[in-house]
Amino acid sequence: MTHVGGFPHLYQGYVTIFPSALEGDSRTSVFNAMLLYLSTDFINLSIASFGHKIIIEVLRHRILSSVLLSFRHLTRHTLTGTSRDPLLTSTISQLEQAFVIFLDNLAAYTTYIKVLRCLGRAMKDMQESGLFTSTYSTPLNDALENLLQSLKNRLDDTQEYGKQLKTANACRNDFCPRGVVCDGSIFRCSGCRDALYCSKQCQREDWKHRHSVDCVEIATNKAEQAREYNLDYFLLQGTDKSREDFFRHSILYNEIKRRWIEVSQLLQHRPAPTVVMRADAPILHFIIRMLGERGTIVYVESSQSNRWFSETIRDTGPVIDESSIDTCVRRISLWRHSGYTLLA
């Protein structure tokens, strides 16, 4: 978004002229509605190509509030029946669908900490401005409700994430001045893949004091079965140096807990028959996609809206692999049936 010049400002301009354009000549109204549709579609394509970085730019430029403001004018226009032009009606329908896809994209990318922070601020501003007023069900209102629920779930996840950070991210260096790996990078010993450090300096110090000996012992004697039940290990398994990766592992765990009934039903069939899921569970969709590689055919239906599309969630794909999902599912299955505690 930063490489397309003044596009965000142009979009704001389209939103400004949109209400008055609806009241004008029919062809002018169609042109302006189509212009807004193409602009929104461009944003959706950019998100599909470049991911969460585009979402952050969109939120920083307050395009979310622009979308909702446009929809208010659009709804008012269609309800009052001021235009019976079939071409305009068709264009407005396309525009509404583009808005719905945009909101669904935002909901899916709440798995990123930076997106979550920007979205939280944007939502607060819009609630204060009264943009959330909706008294009836429409595809876009349903998508907005889905976005609000996703935001609530992720904010709940951040509280759990904070607790897990305190226990799971202990710096292995006994002389570390901070004690935990918090903000910033996570450094992992490349030998045992077990020891975590808050900095390269701590990693070097611990290697000199004791880890040069411990590393070999840990790498050769660690018990896989014991590790399988260790939440700390699961949360950090396969993470790189980014807190974003750690956060998405954390919410994957919480999402499977939250939707265990659906997950357990899926796991009863391998290969599974066609599975229908709601569009407000992006992490679960990723799990289903991984199962889909073993035979599951997946289509997704959003709540209360009749919007169908094949599942194409990409936000967690590069981070959470199939083995991590299997580990998580096994752990939660044991917790459900054997009484294992979820937090160490």
Image (spheres, helix red, strand yellow):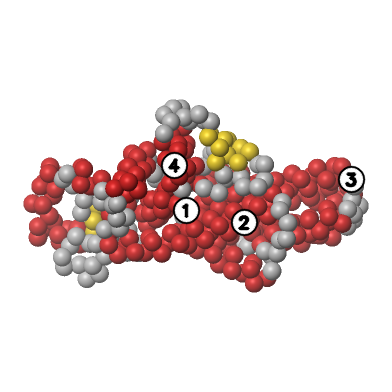
Q: CA distance from mark 4 to mark 1?
A: 19 Å
For label 1, the SS is helix
Of the numbered discs in the image, which one, if any, rests on residue 85? 3
1 or 2: mark nearer the eye = 2
Q: At which x and y percent is residue 201? A: 21, 62
Is residue 236 in view from this perspective? no
Of the numbered discs in the image, which one, if any, rests on residue 263? 4
Q: Amino acid at mark 1?
A: Thr
Observer-nearest of 342 and 5: 342
- Label 2 sits on residue: 145
Q: Is residue 67 left or right of residue 301?
A: right
Q: Is residue 329 left or right of residue 141?
A: left
Of the numbered discs in the image, which one, if any, rests on residue 126? none
| Above or below, comparing residue 209 to residue 269 in the picture | below
**Mark 4 or mark 1, earlier in chain:** 1
**Mark 3 or mark 1, earlier in chain:** 3
4 or 3: mark nearer the eye = 4
- Label 1 sits on residue: 111
4 or 2: mark nearer the eye = 4
